[in-house]
Image (cartoon, rainbow, N blue to C red):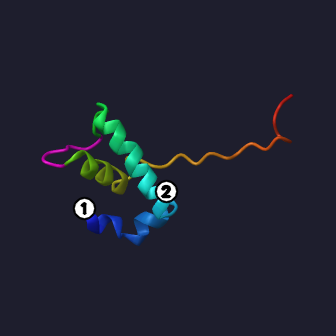
Amino acid sequence: MIEDLRDEDLINRIGGRFKLTALIQKRWKELMFGARPLIEPGDLTPMEVAIREIKEGKIAPKFEVPVSDEDAEP
């Protein structure tokens, strides 16, 4: 699984190493609190499941566009 974290295509697809790490942590926490895996986990740890889900495109970051004060409704 460590090799997957060095995959430049995956890192670029997610938006950088920091975003990839944050996405892994978020999904890992969801799995630890009972979320169902989107892949067949087999003997994988929750962290390995999270990484595999991201690598297979089953989990992706949600990019939010910040709203400026000028765009806000009164």
Image coords of residue 55 (percent x, y): 35, 57
Q: Which residues are magenta?
A: 38-44
Image coords of residue 26 (percent x, y): 41, 44
**Mark seen at residue 19:** 2
Is residue 65 rendered to the left or right of residue 28?
right
| Residue pointed to by mark 1 | 1
Q: 55 above or below 8? A: above
Which three-letter amino acid code belongs to the residue tagged 1? Met
Q: Nearer the viewer, residue 14 or 30?
A: 30
Element on which disc 2 rests: helix
Is residue 36 rendered to the left or right of residue 65?
left
**Residue at left offset 50%, top offset 64%:** 16
Which three-letter amino acid code belongs to the residue tagged 2? Lys
**Residue at left offset 42%, top offset 69%:** 9
Marks 2 and 1 sit apart, C-alpha to C-alpha, by 17 Å
Q: Tell me whether circle 2 and circle 1 mark residues in contact (CB < 8 Å).
A: no
Give the dominant element type of the magenta stretch: helix, strand or loop: loop
Q: 62 above or below 4? A: above
**Mark seen at residue 37:** none
Element on which disc 1 rests: loop
